[in-house]
Amino acid sequence: MIEKPLDQSLKEKIFARAASCLMRIWHFLSKEYIITLVGIVLIAPVVTRSASWFIGPRSYKVYFVGNLDQTGVIDSWRGIKSSLKDEQIEGISIDIIQLDAKPDDAEQISKRIINTDDAILVVGHFGSTASSHALNQYMLADPPIPVILPIESNPDLDVRDSSRAYSPFFRLAPTDEYQAEAAANFAEEVGAKRIWVIEDAETNPIYTRYLAAKFIELIAAKYDEKSYLVNFCEERKVALTYDCDTIRKWASEHYHARVVLKTNVISPPAIDDVKSRDIDFVFFVGQTESCHLITNELGSFFKHTKTKPILLAAKGCESRLGKLPDVSDWETYAINHVSANDFYDREYEARPGIEAGLILKDIFDRVRQSRSLRGVFDMGFLNAVHFILGWHSAPDLRRTLASEMERSIEKTAFPGATNKHDLKFRKNGEVIGKDYIIWRLDKSDGEAKFVDFKPERKNSIASTTTNSERKVEFQKAGQRTKIVSQN
């Protein structure tokens, strides 16, 4: 049987019906697809943000903040990177982010860090002036962002919030109260009589102004004690174990220094004015970047004088002192909170960063050990809920870091940059055990090199009592005289 071909009109009807069905299917799918696509575009950001809020950031951030043009900051960056590697807490990586920030940018940078959702700690800003603008921002955040101050030494950076028992920050350098005291004691030790204080108030004014003022205050107190002791003995005729001639001799040998001139680097005095004051001791308070001014000023001021004054430079000027030709023949000293031998260690400039990294590594280890359900409940109910559900957040971790820092106060010894000492901290953030050391620039071998200064102590009064006992006795007399004279 031979099949007849389909009628042409029937073929057209079948093709039309099939095309119509395909068009309907395509129209339905495309409509649903577009709606779905639009929905994804509109809803995805909300879902992503919600998930980020519940789950937390992909990584935590430690912000390293400082002026990268400043001497030692880049070295400290390398130091912290070398001592803090591949850190994680509960599977979340910890990244160290470098931020270049001039002192004038400190407040703006700190506000930007506070507004991030991943910041857990700040190392910086490598200067008392910059940190004075930023530290309040970090400490008053809710919760506070813990801070490590690598080189800041101004004591007024002690930030306290009355609503909190502890403000989480550590400082790696001893405060300038101790530096001023070491400088004043040194001036007394070498027999300074007429002192010139030069202040660099431009580079880091919070640091330099305090240190210069505190040094002047201590020198004045020492000179006043001399007057009180002598007057007390001569006018009141009170015997203090020794006769007045002995006390007068002892006081004149120990308490004679006075600050007769104070200037700043941008407004130098007239040369004749300096010469007329018979200066025998110069205390330069400045930063590394300003030390070349010593060459420009001091070399010309004392170029034609028979004797050159003793030069003492505050912390931050050491690396330039041995290279200044105009003062190369001076009796030159520097002050720092490490020994002169440590100064020549290849990791000297990197030490603040290394120590900050070692401290953080130790704290992170203890945080990992303490992240139990019982431990997180101590941080608050919400923190415990986050822990149970596997959520994580930078604020929760900041609270834990602050808690671990507080627990370590005066108890935990953190590893230092060398094996010579460990680091402990007080509740106000001060480091315990570090003090300021005077260095002498030694040129005996034809090469200028710093060595620790070891004074030769001479007893002015022969007695069975020690110098310290006599000094306490005389100081008590001076204080009594001060009260009497005021009345």
Image (cartoon, rainbow, N blue to C red):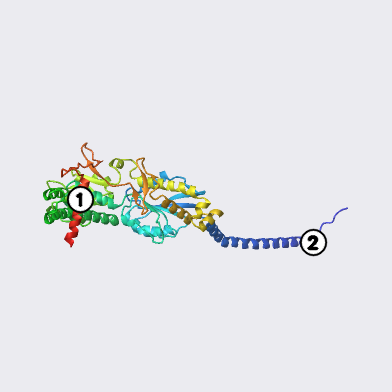
Closer to viewer: mark 2 or mark 1: 1
Residue 10 numbered tag: 2
Q: Measuring 25% from the left and 55% from the top, which residue is drawn there?
A: 214
Q: Is residue 316 left or right of residue 463?
A: right
Q: Quadrant of the C terminus?
A: bottom left
The image position of residue 136, as x and y in percent, is 37, 59
Q: Measuring 33% from the left and 43% from the top, which residue is drawn there?
A: 348
Q: Amino acid at mark 2?
A: Leu
> Between 84 and 374, which is closer to the camera in this rendering?
374
> Between 454 and 70, which is closer to the camera in this rendering?
454
Q: Quadrant of residue 162?
A: bottom left
Q: Residues within 10 Å of mark 2 (few under 14, many from 20)?
A: few
Q: Would residue 425 be seen by someone viewing this image from the given angle?
A: yes
The image position of residue 1, as x and y in percent, is 88, 53
The image position of residue 436, as x and y in percent, is 28, 47
Q: Is residue 287 left or right of residue 191?
A: right
The image position of residue 2, as x and y in percent, is 86, 53
Residue 473 numbered tag: 1
> Between 428 and 247, which is closer to the camera in this rendering?
247
The local secondary structure at tag 2 comes to helix
Mark positioned earlier in the residue sequence (2 or 1): 2
Q: Would residue 294 be seen by someone viewing this image from the given angle?
A: no
Q: Amino acid at mark 1?
A: Glu
Q: CA distance from mark 2 to mark 1?
A: 128 Å
Residue most extreme to the right: 1
